[in-house]
Image (cartoon, helix red, strand yellow):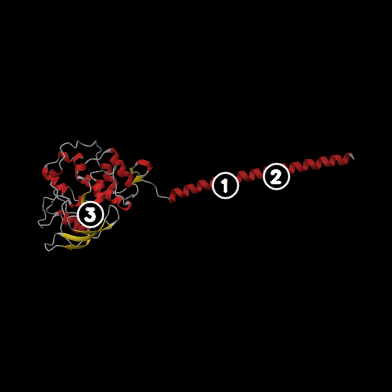
Amino acid sequence: MKNDSLNGIKRSNAVRRTAIAFEMQRHHGAVRRFAVLVAASAALGVVIGFVLPHVSQPVLVLTGGTASVGQAARWLRALPVAQPNSASGYDRDSFAFRSTDDDSNGCDVRDDVLARDLHDVAFAADGCTVISGTLDDPYTGSVIRFHRGTTTSAAVQIDHVVALRNAWISGADQWDSARRIAYANAPANLLAVQGEANQEKSDASADHWLPPSRDFQCPYVALQVSIKYTWHLSVTHSEKEAMGRVLAQCPGAEAPDLGGAQGVSTVLLVPPAVQASPCSCTVCRMRRLDEP
């Protein structure tokens, strides 16, 4: 009986030792598996570090932790930040919009821009006056059938991409008359757009208004940056931030080269969705915007 008891105790101890050994082996196995996973993760991190592109420093760091590269972003970074100048003394007529005919073609600048930005254009007998056409409006993305007339012409208006008043408070108040006239009539600062959108925009900067069409917000801001850079105009802090947020959505966006601000630019900007007409006019005699 005593031997049976001893044998039972030995068997029980052996079972416990076996169970403990099994648990230790299982624990060590888990540790080894964990170590393998850590090593694999580290190796994978090294591989990813070699495979993924590195972000270089010549980027414009913008709000929200995003970054934008490209000419538009570089020019935006170069724009001086300043409080807006006083609007006191601003007079739209001092810019003499639609008062010149620099290429001597006898056409009005409104007709020149309409001929450039509309398609399926029909002209009057004088070869200049646009009497009808179709606008693929860059601001709203809508299609507008333009028909010249006292009650219909306002459906399509000519917008200064950087408004004259905005230019005034950004530095144009210090310009002489010749430079103001050149700026107001530069074709690259003009777009044919939906009249309602133009009125809604008024003289707002990018921190207060952007085109309703998201597809045109990047080109619009890039063009504004190019205009302000070319004509040495300033931006406010909030305006610069707003421009940066838009450009962050289109890294690498290029700013149109407007050819400098000496005299009237001959560069024509046609929005991507707009087909240019055969008209070769660039800048012409001008009347007030609201005339048919």
| Residue drawn at 25 percent across, 46 percent down | 201
**CA separation in Å, label 3 and label 1:** 70 Å
Q: Where is mark 2, residue-wise?
A: 22
Q: Position of residue 159 (x, y in %)?
A: 21, 50
**CA separation in Å, label 1 and label 2:** 21 Å
Considering every residue shown, the one lying at the far right of the view is 1
Mark 2: few/some/many CA within 10 Å (<14, 14-19, 20+): few
Q: Amino acid at mark 2?
A: Phe
Name the element at disc 1.
helix
* Mark 3 / mark 1, whichever is N-terminal: 1
* Mark 3 / mark 2, whichever is N-terminal: 2
| Residue drawn at 67 percent across, 44 percent down | 25
Q: Amino acid at mark 3?
A: Ala
> Is any part of residue 59 visible from this angle?
no
Nearer to us of marks 3 and 2 is: 3
- Residue 36's disc is 1
- The quadrant in which the N terminus is found is top right
Q: Amino acid at mark 1?
A: Val
Mark 1: few/some/many CA within 10 Å (<14, 14-19, 20+): few
Number of numbered discs visible in the structure rendering: 3
Q: Position of residue 116 (x, y in %)?
A: 20, 58
Considering every residue shown, the one lying at the far front of the view is 151
Residues at discs 3 and 2 in contact (Cβ within 8 Å): no
- Residue 155's disc is 3
Residues at discs 1 and 2 in contact (Cβ within 8 Å): no
- The quadrant in which the C terminus is found is bottom left
Q: 172 and 259: which one is in front?
A: 172
Name the element at disc 2.
helix
Mark 3: few/some/many CA within 10 Å (<14, 14-19, 20+): some
